[in-house]
Image (cartoon, rainbow, N blue to C red):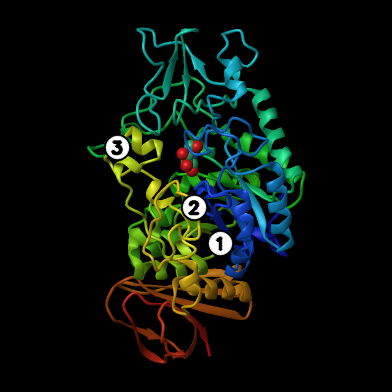
Amino acid sequence: MSSTLGTPPVWWQSGAIYQVYPRSFQDSNGDGIGDLQGIRSRLDYLVALGIDAIWISPFFPSPMADFGYDISDYCGVDPIFGTLGDFDRLIADAHERGVRVILDFVPNHTSDRHPWFAESCSGRSSPKRDWYIWRDPAPGGGPPNNWTSNFGGSAWEYDEMSGQYYYHAFLKAQPDLNWRNPQVRAAMMDALRFWLAHGVDGFRVDVIWHLIKDAEFRDNPPNPAYGPGQPDIARFLQVYSTDQPEVLDIIAQMRATLDEHGDKLLIGEIYLPVERLVAYYGPELSGVHLPFNFQLIHAPWNARGLDTLIETYERALPAGAWPNWVLSNHDQRRISTRVGAAQARVAAMLLLTLRGTPTIYYGDELGLEDAHIPPDAAQDPWEKNEPGLGLGRDPARTPMRWTSLPGAGFTEGVPWLPIGGRPEQNVADQMSDPDSMLHLYHRLLKLRRAHEALSLGKYESVVATGDILAYWRRNGEEGLMIVLNLGHKNTPIELGGVFSVLASTHPDSAEEAGPGIFVMRPDEGLLLKPR
Ligand code: NOJ
């Protein structure tokens, strides 16, 4: 299969993606939960921010056991979020503004309320029995193997009526589909086509590395690094339950389905070490266009480590494969909470100046921090299943702060999660403050759009020491240098020339830097252009 990369670049190479968690972005009807009409009403904000595409987390009909990642109908809209008509209006308005729309596709599992599962449960001879993963008990009784649910406990649920277990990598309310069954594949390709016919520009595919399991269902080996305080899922290495070679055939089938419709984007959610991650570009780039690169989420925040990480990733990319970077998402702690407010500005500069498509998590552009969620306000099923370990994902899912008013301009009702962050972390106040995080995002996204060196250019590491991370981005004649101080003290650096400062994380930055010794201020990031 030929790659769609090349000249001119496709939109998702030069563009920036913005993740909307729909429950928390904008409520339009006062029920305390965000909705499609709410997103539509905020499109102008997103256009002004300078993003190119939105990825909307699931809004399909769902019992909401896992807040939409448990789907009971792949081709509809949950009434909480609106109607299919609302979606059509949203996509039309987005396209009119040049914003692409990427949906979340959740193929690994359905809701246990999906009619397919109800049918599958009706008995061993059901025509849909094999659409899910049913196994007999182990010879001595009990679950068929030692596979663990990502949300704690066994991944097998016993069905009294048939005397078999079904497999669920997540909640028992999220039974895994059997992707070895061609009928399942065909039905899911139809679901993709349904949304493609509604004009969507691509999909982010949920837990794509989970789709195929070991054909023999062998036990996973114990994880030697497992220790107290870790979640259940860390007890075993997921050698047989995930990342099986046959998954690449399925992904190629998804790609082919998208390719029927032009320049559509396929992103895979994949938490794997880099050498396995890049395998998901597929043979001859027949896989996902962007295997989500979550390394900045897990890496210790220091200059030398990040320098090596970026280099290693760049080198691991197959020929023609396009990189991408992510700082936060709805499953992780927010970047501001992980690295602190000052370094979050450095992180923003890093995200928006590295080579590859950046994905921005809603609210990160305000420096929004994780909220404290009192135990009785917890919503996340993972937190409820394994309380007290700090696994809960609610803190990073709190409502977008549009204003400093009660309800944050998000809702006129009672928000489904508490309004988090600090009061000044809101759009209205930051719009009128040129030194705000929001303005920093605006500036960086604008520069990224204006300079192909940033959006498309090569990456070249600069030798640096201590807390300094530095690199060039080059395209044709143009070269831009990025210098980031990941430390909290003044740090002198040697600049081999005179540079204009195109952007700084700090207010009151000099307009020029160099030649000779230049002192980087604590937590400072600079985007420089040689004079
Ligand atoms: C990954 C999603 O990002 C997460 O929110 C969800 O709980 C699991 N997949 C299960 O669908």
The image quarter containing residue 119 is top right
- Asked if ligand 1 lies within 8 A of label 3, the reply is no
- Numbered disc 1: secondary structure: loop
- Relative image position of residue 352 (x, y in whole percent): 51, 67
* Secondary structure state at the residue bearing disc 3: loop
> Disc 1 and disc 3: Cα gap in Å?
37 Å
Q: Quadrant of the N terminus?
A: top right
Q: Amino acid at mark 3?
A: Pro
Q: Residue 518 or 313: which is nearer the viewer?
A: 518
From the viewer's perspective, is 270 left or right of 13? Answer: left
Q: Mark 3 highlights which residue?
A: 387
Asked if the residue under mark 2 is in contact with the one under mark 1, i.e. CB atoms within 8 Å, the reply is: yes
| Vertical placement of residue 525 versus 254, above or below | below
Q: Nearer the viewer, mark 3 or mark 2?
A: 3
Q: Is residue 360 visible?
A: yes
Which of the marked residues, 3 or 2, is nearer the chain's N terminus? 2
The x, y position of residue 4, in whole percent, is 71, 54
Asked if labels 3 and 1 touch by Cβ distance under 8 angstroms, the answer is: no
Residue position for label 2: 293
Q: Which residue is mark 1?
A: 356
Res 461 visible: no
- Quick one: which residue is furthest to the left in this view? 228
Question: Compared to 436, does 39 lie above or below?
Answer: above
